[in-house]
Image (cartoon, rainbow, N blue to C red):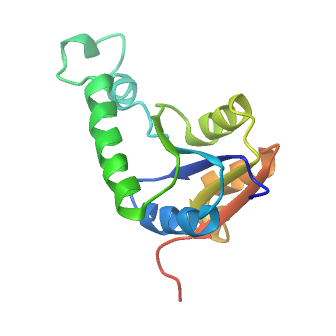
Amino acid sequence: MSAYKKVIVAIDLEGGAGDVLAQATTLLEGTDADVTVLNVPYDVVQMYGASMGAGIYSTANLDLDNDQIRKSIEEKIQALVDEYHVPKCEVVVNFGRPVDLILKHAEAQNADLILMGSHGRHGLGLLLGSTANGVLHRAKCDVLAVRVGDKS
């Protein structure tokens, strides 16, 4: 029996997802925890429209569709979940600012653990990473940051 009953596993498909999922599988093996694998990419349709000047260019005419993008991401995540044998898992993809949506999802699910990767390679986030740092300092539950990438 695990101390953790509701776990959010936040992954980044840009790198380190395998490290995080491997740690989740090890940590949660033999438990009855409900696991949500969460990916929060920025809203590419909205970002593209904003970068092109929302008042001048309409994204309605572009061949960009968040539902198609979500489906593609969900399929990639499901393949990783299957590869790493993550138990009792739900896959969720939400578009937006990663820190805010990870925390919002964890609170809505009454999660008692957020498991996520930390690249730790940018500016002030050299030790932890900006997303991991934001989640760690604002979460109302335990946070486990898995070091991803170069482990030396």
**Residue 42, percent from left and from top:** 44, 36
Quadrant position of residue 17: bottom left
| Residue sitting at x 75%, y 53% | 4
Q: Nearer the viewer, residue 66 or 2?
A: 2
| Residue sitting at x 48%, y 69% | 19
Q: Nearer the viewer, residue 8 or 49?
A: 8
| Residue sitting at x 41%, y 30% | 43
Q: Nearer the viewer, residue 65 or 7?
A: 7
Evaluate whether residue 57 shows in this view: no
Report how many numbered discs are placed on residues in the image. 0
Above or below: residue 111 compared with residue 117: above
Residue extending furthest toward the bottom: 152
Quadrant position of residue 49: top left
Q: Nearer the viewer, residue 113 or 35?
A: 35
**Residue 65, percent from left and from top:** 26, 23
**Residue 62, percent from left and from top:** 19, 19
Left or right: residue 48 versus residue 106 is: left
Left or right: residue 58 versus residue 91 is: left
Above or below: residue 52 compared with residue 14: above
**Residue 45, percent from left and from top:** 33, 25
Above or below: residue 115 compared with residue 106: below
| Residue sitting at x 46%, y 53% | 12
Evaluate whether residue 41 shows in this view: yes
Left or right: residue 54 versus residue 72 is: right
Left or right: residue 61 versus residue 73 is: left
Quadrant position of residue 73: top left
Looking at the rendered image, the quarter that the N terminus falls into is bottom right
